[in-house]
């Protein structure tokens, strides 16, 4: 059974998330995107867990379902901020759990270490080795996945408070870490350059803070298993049944290049090294991006591919492509009109991104839209790299664009930042 999953999401009680996040909206837009398995998000939060229990029914499979049968898996994210060997560390970890009973025990543990009611992604002064050891004492079925591992501020390998290896971070508990979430600003090919990562399953998820189709499922992991919690965890731990991932182009991520957002400085690592990583405008330290960190830690040349490497698709969300082509905001009526026509014709976004033929695309959209979708599929769209919290942007020449009247967004996007 082919499963396209997004197992790192948030509910509306996490900081900087949409107040419209609900199980109903998550299911609706997961179906529009083409996902068929979601993480439940933020199960430690007292208000969100109430909604999960009200809207999701569990059974012995470890998969929870809505009234219409859409599947979820229990998941949350924890922020560990602590000192290790005299250095401040900041690491986010995704936690997967098999049932509500185990979730209750996990939440009780975190309550013994602090509060869980102020944020869906709570912060604890909890070293990563202790986190893993404590979770395994509750249940060996709990899975810990380091989140967006290259992100500067809260990634395992991040330039600001990160480590140089999984073993350095998790110490004697590293043997219980089986998968790494690559994050938006890196892809599997970048991670293949580190031989010490070969044993890990590389997974990708959206870390969504809103449910819109340019957020949900923008990164996803593909499994070929009979759907159960046990089978999914086995795939993560052994790579059997893990088929690959859906990625955005790493340049689209918010931290791919080095830079300084306030000064509008974006730099390739080779150039930032020449100026000793100092912003040429304000004289402060640049935010060191993901590509820079990969170059620092890599022991293989660019282009190396392990023998057992899983395949991946590199895709920019359709809404972003349409928005750039017609010079209209991603949430404008014009963008939605073209997007909805495509979904009505092909069923979901992944069908458009991966399967639709040009002649069929042109039946419901302009030839330039069809050409851009095919270029996207082939990885031929140029991306202005993201840096220091700014998303990258797809670039098109004037001849590739369509004329469109600019409409105001249908909703307020302010504050809906994602890692």
Image (cartoon, rainbow, N blue to C red):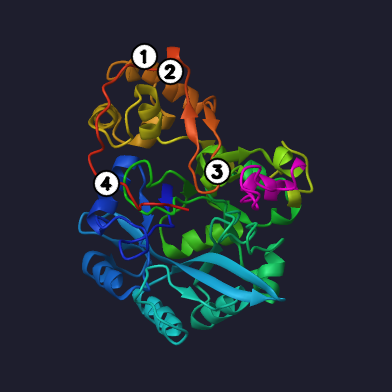
Task: Give the alpha-carbon distance from disc 4 to disc 3, as whole Å.
Answer: 25 Å
Q: Residue 315 at what x, y percent from top left?
A: 48, 35
Q: Nearer the viewer, mark 3 or mark 1?
A: 3
Residue 378 lies left or right of residue 97; in this view the side is right
| SS of the residue under disc 4 | loop
| SS of the residue under disc 3 | helix
Q: Residues within 10 Å of mark 4 (few under 14, many from 20)?
A: few
Q: Residue 129 at what x, y percent from top left?
A: 62, 76
Residue drawn at x 42%, y 66% is 76
Q: Residue 305 at what x, y percent from top left?
A: 70, 40
Q: Nearer the viewer, mark 2 or mark 3?
A: 3
Q: Are marks 2 and 4 in contact (CB under 8 Å)?
A: no
Which residue bears the numbered disc 1? 367
Q: Residues within 10 Å of mark 3 (few under 14, many from 20)?
A: few
Q: Are marks 2 and 3 in contact (CB under 8 Å)?
A: no
Residue drawn at x 41%, y 82% is 105
Which residue bears the numbered disc 4? 412
Which is more N-terminal, label 3 or label 2? Answer: 3
Q: Are marks 2 and 1 in contact (CB under 8 Å)?
A: yes
Which residue bears the numbered disc 2? 371
Which is more N-terminal, label 1 or label 3? Answer: 3
Task: Give the alpha-carbon distance from disc 2 to disc 4, as whole Å.
Answer: 30 Å
Residue 160 lies left or right of residue 342; in this view the side is right
Which residue bears the numbered disc 3? 263
Q: Nearer the viewer, mark 4 or mark 3?
A: 3
Q: Determine whether 116 is above or below 401 in the image.
A: below
Q: Which residues are magenta?
A: 274-295
């Amino acid at each position: 059974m082919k499963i396209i999953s997004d197992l790192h999401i948030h509910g509306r009680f996490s900081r900087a998330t949409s107040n419209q996040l609900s199980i109903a909206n998550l299911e609706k837009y997961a179906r529009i995107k083409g996902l068929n398995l979601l993480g439940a998000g933020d199960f430690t939060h007292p208000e969100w867990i109430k909604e999960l229990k009200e809207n999701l029914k569990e059974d012995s499979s470890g998969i929870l379902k809505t009234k219409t049968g859409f599947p979820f898996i229990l998941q949350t994210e924890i922020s560990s901020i602590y000192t290790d060997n005299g250095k401040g560390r900041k690491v986010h970890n995704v936690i997967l759990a098999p049932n509500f009973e185990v979730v209750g025990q996990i939440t009780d543990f975190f309550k013994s270490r602090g509060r869980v009611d102020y944020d869906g992604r709570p912060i604890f002064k909890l070293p990563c080795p202790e986190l893993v050891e404590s979770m395994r004492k509750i249940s060996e079925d709990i899975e810990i996945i380091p989140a967006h591992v290259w992100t500067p501020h809260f990634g395992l390998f991040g330039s600001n408070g990160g480590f140089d290896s999984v073993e350095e971070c998790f110490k004697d508990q590293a043997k219980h870490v089986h998968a790494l979430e690559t994050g938006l600003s890196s892809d599997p090919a970048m991670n293949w350059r580190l031989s010490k990562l070969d044993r890990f399953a590389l997974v990708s998820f959206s870390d969504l803070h809103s449910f819109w189709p340019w957020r949900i499922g923008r990164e996803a992991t593909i499994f070929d298993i009979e759907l159960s919690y046990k089978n999914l965890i086995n795939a993560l731990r052994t790579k059997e049944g893990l088929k690959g991932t859906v990625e955005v182009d790493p340049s689209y991520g918010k931290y791919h290049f080095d830079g300084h957002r306030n000064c509008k400085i974006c730099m390739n690592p080779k150039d930032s090294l020449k100026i000793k990583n100092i912003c040429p405008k304000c004289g402060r330290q640049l935010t060191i991006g993901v590509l820079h960190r990969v170059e620092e830690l890599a022991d293989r040349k660019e282009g190396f591919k392990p023998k057992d490497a899983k395949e991946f698709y590199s895709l920019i969300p359709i809404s972003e492509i349409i928005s750039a082509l017609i010079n209209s905001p991603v949430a404008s009526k014009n963008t939605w009109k073209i997007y909805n026509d495509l979904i009505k014709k092909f069923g979901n976004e992944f069908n458009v991104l991966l399967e639709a033929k040009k002649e069929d695309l042109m039946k419901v959209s302009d030839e330039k839209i069809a050409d851009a979708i095919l270029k996207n599929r082939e990885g031929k769209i140029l991306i202005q790299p993201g840096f220091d919290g700014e998303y990258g942007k797809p670039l098109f020449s004037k001849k590739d664009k369509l004329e469109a009247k600019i409409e105001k967004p249908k909703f307020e996007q302010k504050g809906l930042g994602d890692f």
